[in-house]
Image (cartoon, helix red, strand yellow):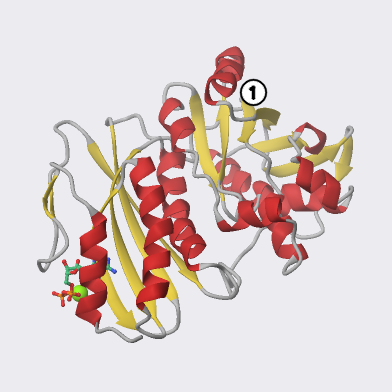
Amino acid sequence: MQAGEFDLIARIRARAGTRADVVLGIGDDAALLQPPPGRQLVVTADMLNVGVHFPEDTAAAAVGWKSLAVNLSDLAAMGAAPAWCMLSLSLPASDPDWLEGFLDGFLSLASRSGIVLVGGDTTRGPLSIAVTAMGFIEPGKALRRDGARVGDEVWVSGTPGDAAAALRLHPAAPAALRERLDRPSPRNALGLRLPGIASAAVDVSDGLLADLGHITRSSGAGAVIELEHLPVSEALRAAFDPPSRHDLQASGGDDYELCFTAAPEHHAAIDALARELDLPLACIGRIVEGEGVRARVDGQPWQAARTGYAHF
Ligand code: ADP
Ligand code: MG
């Protein structure tokens, strides 16, 4: 069944919901939003293209979930509280069933994350989803990439490597790995707790070494990480032995975990946070003098087969 652009927008509007801080949401030329007094606005955008950011066989609900999750992950990496988002859709056909499935995934993650859809754009073209997410932060509290100091510990959440493993095994990936590729869990609960603890943070979208490299470059330092300290999921352990496993953990993208640095005095507090959030937080290395990220396995230098994902 085909539907017009305005029918598609009406379906989105009917399901989007609203909130008191949305003075004017979907339906006018632009949205009117009321930030809380004394908070800075944190704004981020991420685009997902079929065949580049998700396999063509990805379910509509997973595409919806992931398109919001990757943006929530950027807010998490800044330590911001999710607030509002915009959704720009390029669709090859006007397919209401696909759109409803997409909204199932998008809006279920939105409501559990406290983010409200306030506008967007709907056009015809190759399947592509561009989301802009906005959040709030107290001035001076944002987690930036340039705050790491020599001697800080390097931490990572979750079990990096799972999403890249699913991609490598595609289309025959075990369900547990495919789930991690399709429905990443943005770490907003963690991100909200890190201001005051972390000195720098980044989300792991392009690969752990590559993304940690953004912190070391911005901070004017280097890092040494011990790959055997990375938590390994059951599914990844079953599917890949080292050295392929280390390659996926160190260089695989799409995990949307957080990598952050913190002074050693915060070590116990971070361990306690991991228990409280029921989320693995592993201390995997240190910030050192110099530049670049060096990885080791059992104390021996480890050379990546490939570094993180880059589009060009
Ligand atoms: P205009 O032509 O003035 O840009 P549109 O027809 O593109 O208006 O959009 C009408 C309203 O619907 C606007 O409020 C816009 O933000 C909203 N909208 C359009 N597409 C989407 C979408 N994919 N998700 C959420 N809101 C949307
Ligand atoms: Mg428009």
> Residue 121: image x %, image y %?
26, 72
Residue 85 horizontal side relative to residue 155, left or right: left
Instruction: Please determine whether, in this image, residue 55 is positioned above or below residue 291.
Output: below
Label 1 is placed on what type of residue?
Gly
The answer to whether one can see residue 297 in this image is yes
Instruction: Name the secondary structure under disc 1.
Output: loop
Instruction: Please determine whether, in this image, residue 236 is positioned above or below residue 100.
Output: above
Observer-nearest of 7 and 123: 7
Quarter of the image with the N terminus in it: bottom left
> Residue 256: image x %, image y %?
56, 48
Instruction: Please determine whether, in this image, residue 29 is positioned above or below residue 42.
Output: below
Quarter of the image with the C terminus in it: bottom right
Instruction: Please determine whether, in this image, residue 163 is positioned above or below residue 260.
Output: below
Residue drawn where x is 25% and y is 68% of the image: 11
Residue drawn where x is 48% and y is 22% of the image: 197
The number of callouts visible is 1
Residue drawn where x is 34% and y is 45% of the image: 111
The answer to whether one can see residue 119 in this image is no
Q: Where does ligand 2 appear, by image quarter?
A: bottom left
> Residue 295: image x %, image y %?
78, 41
Residue 163 horizontal side relative to residue 146, left or right: right
- Look at mark 1 in the image and give the residue it sits on: 151
Residue 72 horizontal side relative to residue 178, left or right: left
> Residue 10: image x %, image y %?
20, 70
Residue drawn where x is 57% and y is 58% of the image: 182
Q: Residue furthest front?
A: 1
Residue 275 falls in which quadrant of the image? top right
Residue 96 falls in which quadrant of the image? bottom left
Q: Residues within 10 Å of mark 1 (few under 14, many from 20)?
A: some
Residue 67 horizontal side relative to residue 304, left or right: left
